[in-house]
Image: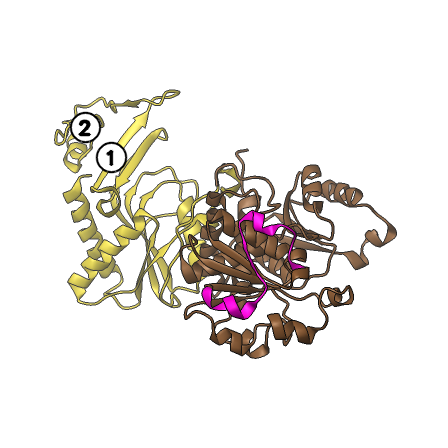
Amino acid sequence: MGESEIRRALVRIVHEILEKNKGIKKLGLIGIKRRGDFIARRLAERIQESEGVKIPIGALDITLYRDDLQLVSETPIIEGTDIPFNINKKVIILVDDVLYTGRTIRAAIEEILDFGRPKAIQLVVLVDRGHRELPIQADFIGKKVPTAKNEIVDVFIKEFDGKDSVVLHYYKKGKDKVRKRRRKSRIKLHTEPKPKIKQLTITDIDKSK
Amino acid sequence: MNNPKKDLLGIENLARKEIYQYLDLANNFVEVLERPIPIVPSLRGKTILTLFFEPSTRTQLSFSIAAKRLSADVVSFSRATSSVSKGETLLDTAKNIEAMKVDGVVVRHSAAGAAKYLAERLGAFVINAGDGSHEHPTQALLDLMTMKHHFSNFKDLKVLIVGDIAHSRVARSNIFGLKTLNAKVAICAPPTMIPLEIEKVGIDVFSNLDDVIGDFDVVMVLRIQLERQASGLFPSTREYRTLYGLTKERVLKMKANSIIMHPGPTNRGVEIDPDVADSNKSVILEQVKNGVAIRMAILFIHAGGKIE
């Protein structure tokens, strides 16, 4: 996804959120650090533009709730959680960049529930790449990108990485080498800027169907 | 921390980076402790043993609470009701612990080096909660954390430690830590309580508190061990207070943003006056609060994972 597609997807998501919840009453945004946090802030800005009201926003660091703490060899770096509003009876819009196995979201839900009892939690993700290992679903999705397990989805966010884009690439088995993704049907390459990695755009995927 | 050491035995050999790792991580736990449910599941399934051969209220409680806030299970050993009274050696106590497969041991013992002794023989990680007069690293870390909250930079921070330095593991650990972080440390005590040749460690030594108290950012007061009066180290508690006690008059001479610290428990009216201990310059209760957070950080780092 390029910068404009990400922007359009976020605008659409904001409208979907407002439509599903019939307005902004009782909404609260929580972004999952680190990139989900920036996406949540953008959503907050758009909601404020659209409805003229600021909705409360917080940021979550799920490191202490991970289910794989015993498997990491280094002490994880914790950025800290900051939820400056009361979440009781609110509809929490949880925001993350990529939905993959669902374990991050499971940890986030558990952490949120330690802060109180929200009325509901709805999930926004920029990219849903499939391969769930837990029964978790997103309510609002920027883009569904079917992937193989050995592929990697990289999300870049301007405030953090200097640019907005979603990139798909994969490593060949056994070697740390980036290869072009091969598909049977012809796909037009996105040529600007000239990447070694193929950037898939919405039009490319549609054409290849 | 990449490849953290298994045990925390002292501050003397900790690098600056390692000290900061504990301090930074502890700040996250301060936030956790303020939540409606101040518990995280990070150490679920782990068992921590508090092995205290010397009496303690605050350190033992602090570690118990810290472990429980991380969802770990805590078991406690108290010397009085243990087989030590039947003559069981430290080595046998250790072997029994090992056989029961606890994950971590927090030990306080009257013999210097006891923590290291256990660390070498146990697969469990060992945290030194005070070994004789040698070190009390977790106290020093919480003291450093408290100082950092008030002063942000240790370089050239002026810290004065007042009291029975010679017998204080709290003083030793703080001195090690502050020197590593390039702070300026000085001590003030009656000559009987000053360790021999301590100037060689690069510390200023004073015996007149009134002359110097106005120069320091942090004044750390140590507990006078009243039993030492019997051995003649000071003539009476009243005389100690007159010369070295932190009274209101002395506090009025202190710098504007300076703070007063005390590891506890306080002898009100001896080394520190009650109204001083309760004043807004005193950060004694903050130290206790930070103590839980830093011990959570210590347990989290040392109980933390290895690739399986």
Instruction: Tell me whether the residue at label 1 lies in contact with that at label 2, contact meaning CB atoms closer than 8 angstroms.
Output: yes
Please report the residue visible at 31 percent of the width from the left and 67 percent of the height from the top.
A26
Judge left or right: residue B96 versus residue B241.
Answer: right
Determine the residue positioned at 69% across, 54% down.
B75
Viewer-closest of B242 and B178? B242
Three-letter amino acid code of the residue under disc 2: Pro
Res A135 seen here: no
Residue A59 drawn at (x, y percent): 35, 56
Q: Was residue B203 drawn as part of the magenta stretch in this picture?
A: yes
Residue A118's x, y, as percent?
39, 64
Nearer-the-camera pick, A57 or B202: B202
- Find disc 1 in the rendering and name its residue: A167
Q: Is the image coloured rainbow, by chain, by secondary structure, or in one colour?
A: by chain
Q: Which numbered marker is on residue A195?
A: 2
**B102 on left or right of A72:** right
Quadrant into which the C terminus of chain B falls: top right
User: Amino acid under label 1?
Assistant: Val
- Residue found 62% across the figure and 50% down from its top: B197
Instruction: Decide which of B238, A145 is in the foreground and name it.
Output: B238
Q: Which of the numbered marks, if any, corresponds to residue B179? A: none
Q: The yellow chain is which one?
A: A
**Disc 2 packing (10 Å; few <14; some 14–19; many ≥20):** few
Q: Where is residue B122 in the image (x, y as percent from the top left)?
A: 69, 39
Residue furthest right as drawn: B86
Magenta range? B193-215
Residue B262 on image: x %, y %: 57, 65
Q: Given the image, what chain letter belongs to the residue carrying mark 2?
A: A
Vertical comparison of B118 with A197: above or below: below
* Rendered colour, chain B: brown
- Residue at position x 69%, y 73% from top? B237
- Disc 2 on helix, strand or loop? loop
